[in-house]
Amino acid sequence: MPGVRARAAELSKQLVASARSSEQCQLLASIPGVGSVTASSFVAAIEDPENFRKSRSVGAWIGLTTRRYQSGEVDYDGHISRRGDNHLRGLLYEAATVILTRTKADSALRIWASRRKSGSSEPPSRSRASLP
C-alpha cells in the first residue's frame, strides 16, 4: 500500500498546484471553508458559466433547490432535490457548515444565515465589495 499512498499524495499536490494557477479556483478558495478540492470540483463541474442564465440555475443544476409539491390547494416545498453532482453538493454543504459554525469573522452569508434563523429572510448583499 505505500505505492498507493505515495500516488495519492502526488495527486493531491498536483490538485493544489492546479488550483493555485487557476484564477477561478483562487477566487473560490478565498471563501472560508472552501479549499482546493471544493474550488477545483466546482470549476470542473460548472465548466462554462455562460451555460447558466441565473445563479439560481446553478443551485438547481447541482441539486440544492427544494423539491416542490403542488396538488389542488396544497403547495409546499420539501427537502432539497438531491439531483446533480452528489460529491460537489457534499463539498458545498461542508463549506457552508464551516462558514456557519467554525468561522469567527462575520461575512454577508453568515449574517444572512443568522438573520434567517431568527426569522428575517432578507438576502445577503450582492456587492463584490463585501467579499473578503
Image: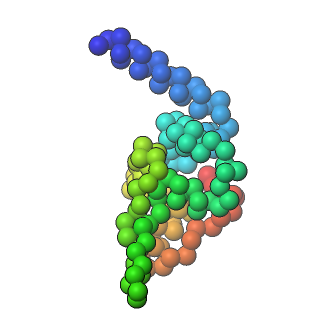
**In-image side of 11 versus 124 (left or right):** left
Location of residue 18 in the rendering, given as x and y in whole percent from the top left corner: 59, 28
The spot of residue 90 in percent (x, y) is 40, 48
Residue beneath the point at 54% across and 28% down = 16
Quarter that holds the N terminus:
top left
Q: How many marks?
A: 0
Residue 108, placed above or below residue 15: below
Q: Residue at x 69, y 62 (%)?
A: 127
Q: Residue furthest front?
A: 72
Residue 47 is situated, as x and y percent measured from the top left of the image, at: 62, 41
Left or right of 77 in this view: 29: right
Residue 12 seen in this snapshot: yes
Q: Nearer the viewer, residue 20 or 52?
A: 52
For this view, does 46 lie left or right of residue 84?
right
Vertical side of 89 occupied by 11: above or below: above
For the rendered model, the colour scheme is rainbow
Q: Residue furthest bottom?
A: 73
Farthest residue to the left: give it: 1
Position above or below: 103 against 43: below
99 with respect to 132 (left or right): left
Residue sticking out furthest to the top: 3
Say if residue 103 shows up in the picture. no
Which image quadrant is residue 9 in?
top left
Relative to 54, does residue 69 appear above or below in the rendering?
below
Q: Position of residue 121 (x, y in %)?
A: 50, 76
